Image (spheres, helix red, strand yellow):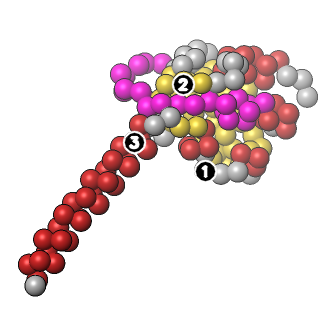
Amino acid sequence: MKKSKFYIALPALIITIIALCLIYFVNENSNKTFTNFYGNDMHKIDKIDIINGSNGNIVTITDKKMISDIRNYFSSLEFEKAPDDKKDGWTYSFAVYEGYKNSFNITFMGENDCGINGKKYKITKSNGDTVESLYVTAKNFKK
């Protein structure tokens, strides 16, 4: 009797492990949106620093309209995991704050590649804006 339970339990365990691995693999390699990475309420963002990778200049944004524009841009993005091909340099980095505490960072390496949480992603969809246009608009914004 004990052997028959073992022969039933073992295949069930193996099937469960395989199913969990498949779910993980599919989830890890499927397209993601910004909300998959940013677990907080995006409407609580109260400050964003944009750092220019070519000269180190920092633009700090606290204006609600500008934050909303950047939030809308981030919300429009879709990502797919990209191979880690060790590119040097980056164009812009965004540091996102809630309650003036850093809650998220995203680094762009050109217009189509970015780094989030130590992993590289390719941007597969956006609303047509560019990170450079967001930086220029923020830099020229007058309060």
Span of residues in magenta = 69-90
Q: CA distance from mark 1 to mark 2?
A: 19 Å
* Quarter assignment of residue 51: top right
Image quarter hosting the C terminus: top right
**Residue 42 x, y percent position in the rendering:** 71, 45
Label 2 belongs to which residue?
Answer: 123
* Residue type at the position of mark 3: Val
Residue placed at 70% from the left, 29% from the top?
73
Q: Which one is earlier in the sequence, the residue at label 1 or at label 3?
A: 3
Residue 89 among magenta residues: yes
Q: Amino acid at mark 1?
A: Gly
At mark 2, the secondary structure is strand
Q: Nearer the viewer, residue 126 or 60?
A: 126
**Residue 141 - label:** none
Q: Label 1, secondary structure: give it.
A: loop
Residue 133 percent across, percent down from the top left: 72, 16
